[in-house]
Image (spheres, coloured by chain):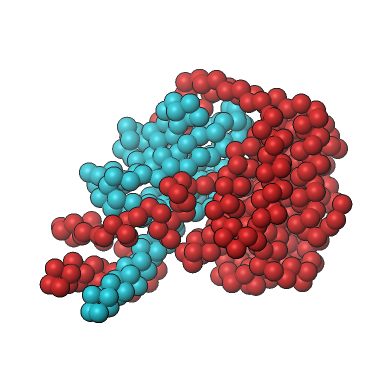
Chain colours: A cyan, B red
Amino acid sequence: MKKLIYLLGFLTFGLGANAQECDSLVNVCYEYLQIDARNGKVFISDGQVYRAFVDADQSAEFKVTFYGGSLYRIATTAGVKDNYVIFNVYDQERNLLFTNQDQNPANQPYWDFKVDNTLDVYIEAYLDIDKKVSGCMVILIGFQK
Amino acid sequence: MKKTIIYLLPLLTLAMMYSCGGDNIDVDSQEDNSDIVVVPDHVLDSSSAMNTIINGRMFSIPSPVQMATLIKSKVGVYNETLLTDPENVANFTTEFKRAINMGIYGADLGYATIYENNTKAVSYLSSIEKLADELGISGAFNQELLERFIENGNNQDSMLVIMSEGYREGDKFLKDNEEHDIATLILTGGWIESLYFAAVSYEDSQEQDVADRIGEQKTALTTIIDLLDDYNADEYFTQLIADLKDLKVDFDKIEFNYQYVEPVHDPANFQTTIKSKSSVKIDDDVLANILAKIKNIRNGLIGVTA
């Protein structure tokens, strides 16, 4: 019975904590969409919040259609003190179009994509295990009007 | 029992630190502890309720604002007959109707904003606020957001950002509260309405870029059907799923060509240009079927019978 009480307590606080951690990170991630607004580079969120609570051996992946003639920004975060998220963008044939892993700074948390012709891309994201082994990961997608 | 307590106490402590932290929670506090916290597998399960993942996949549906932007750039003319009546809120008496029409109103709001019809846009936002309240997500679309929208009436980018902020907050709230079905219906309504804009605009203008953009919605259609299927436990979406699957029969006849071209990276500006080539080929009869089906589905959802 006591075990059950402990477990229920954990579930109540633990899942609430995860949700709250994710909530804060959504706001952090949103800042990356707006970071160049003063320079006239405004990205409008697609209205969706992509997030997952992941550990070292898990990744999140989703398929997005990028329309020709558009400029998109992918923004990611799993915390403010470092760049914890590695994200890769593949085309439908699994050709790697981009990875933030080898950029400067490493794991740059946001990147823009100018799209000449419409294509479906797969965005794969996971934690850099040298920096973080588990936690909430948030991804936002914005586009320029 | 001791082992259980040893595992649970630090977790409870950590959980309470997070839970009581308010809005200014330190999202990096886990890194500040030298000990790695062992978190049970069920909390890390990628299919747990707090995620947007279904069966290991995340989903993305294109924003209606992008379609409205394309239509304005290619067709130009503002067409108010495309839009629904913002005063119809009282007619939406079920959760399904409210959610789907909240998405439809969102697309109408985007269209009116892109065409700088601010009066119309505000009337949609007011109706969205009412629907959001009835759906229990009034925190996302509230009076403060409406006032900010009006105050920024001379800045279209700001208006679109504020609008997307409302939908993003709503999406977050619904997913937090495991109301993925409502979130999905809102996205579905917005997508169907944007496709309706494109269908009618193409019929009026015969603009090929608009036809191509309709054809390019195949991935979104497949995603929406998958999502609705996943959340159809109560079978409220059965008819809509059947209609969309019927629409997909025609979408499956569209020919897509894709050729990979090496992208060009511009690290100084944190930008990559994707140079790959693609094209869409839609036969006239297939396109005609698609247009007719889109109009039927959309008119059925807003309560207009053909």
Compared with A8, A62 (above or below) is above
Height in image: B146 above or below A98? Answer: below
Q: In terms of image quadrants, where is residue B35?
A: bottom left
Q: Where is residue B273 in the image (x, y as percent from the top left)?
A: 51, 28
**Front residue of this view, candidates B164 and A36:** B164
Q: Position of residue A139 (x, y in %)?
A: 44, 48
- Please identify the quadrant where the C terminus of chain A is shown: top right
- Residue B180 in sight in this render: yes
Nearer-the-camera pick, A8 or B162? A8
The answer to whether residue A145 of the structure is visible from this angle is: no
- Residue found at x 38% / y 33%: A99
Horizontal and vertical percent position of residue B169: 53, 61
B261 left or right, relative to B65 = left
Q: Residue at x 57, y 23 (%)?
A: B258
Query: Which residue is located at x 77 percent, y 71 percent?
Result: B90
In-front residue for pair B156/B207: B207
In this image, A100 relative to B278: left or right? Answer: left
Residue at left 44%, top 34%? A89
Rendering coords of residue B135 (x, y %): 62, 69
Does residue B132 appear left or right of residue B24 in this picture?
right
The quadrant of the image that shows the N terminus of chain A is bottom left
Q: Nearer the viewer, residue A109 or A89?
A: A89
When the figure is inspected, residue B299 is found, relative to residue B98, above or below; the finding is: above
